[in-house]
Amino acid sequence: MEVERKVTVSNKYGLHARASTALVKMASQFDSEVLLGRDGSDELVDAKSILGIMSMGAECGSNLYLKADGDDATAALDAIISLFDRKFDEE
């Protein structure tokens, strides 16, 4: 099953090293392929790759697009959206 969602980066420092690591750890808990990109762009990176996420340079206020494909795609995106909503437990 393929699932798509949008999310806004709301933590103060954006997807810096610590937040990117938390995202990779969360995405890696699921079997589904999870991709992340800037909203409106066709370029997506593997959400299980710290280098891919860091290369995006997503700062606070960035609108991102999540796409997951697999048996646990909905659960994966629910968990990742929760992580964004919690501001990566940094604030």
Image (tube, rainbow, N blue to C red):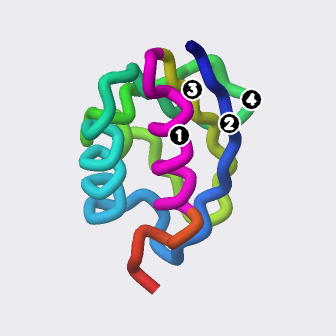
Label whose residue precedes the other's in the sequence (2 or 3): 2
Q: Nearer the viewer, mark 4 or mark 2?
A: 2
Residue 15, x across and y down, in percent: 43, 57
Work out whether 10 lies above or below 42: below
Q: Amino acid at mark 4?
A: Gly
Whichever of callouts 3 and 1 sits on the residue coming sooner in the sequence is 3
Which marked residue is nearer to the observer: mark 4 or mark 3? 3
Horizontal arrangement in the rendering, residue 70 relative to residue 25 (left or right): right
Amino acid marked by disc 1 = Leu
Kindly identify the amino acid type of the residue bearing the numbered disc 3.
Answer: Lys
Which residue: 32% across, 33% down? 30
* 79 magenta-colored: yes
Mark closer to the observer (3, 1): 1
- For mark 4, what is the residue? 40
Judging by the rendered image, the residue that carries numbered circle 2 is: 5
Magenta residues?
70-84
**Disc assigned to residue 41:** none
* Point 42% across, 68% down: residue: 88
Q: CA distance from mark 2 to mark 3?
A: 7 Å
Which residue is label 1 attached to? 77
Would you say residue 28 sits in the magenta stretch? Answer: no
Q: If you read the primary sequence from the N terminus, does the residue marked by circle 4 or circle 1 appear first?
A: 4
Which amino acid does the dot numbered 2 rest on? Arg
Q: Secondary structure at mark 2?
A: strand
Asked whether, in this view, residue 3 is left or right of residue 53, the answer is right
Q: Residues within 10 Å of mark 3 (few under 14, many from 20)?
A: many
Which numbered dot is residue 67?
3
Identify the element where label 1 is drawn.
helix
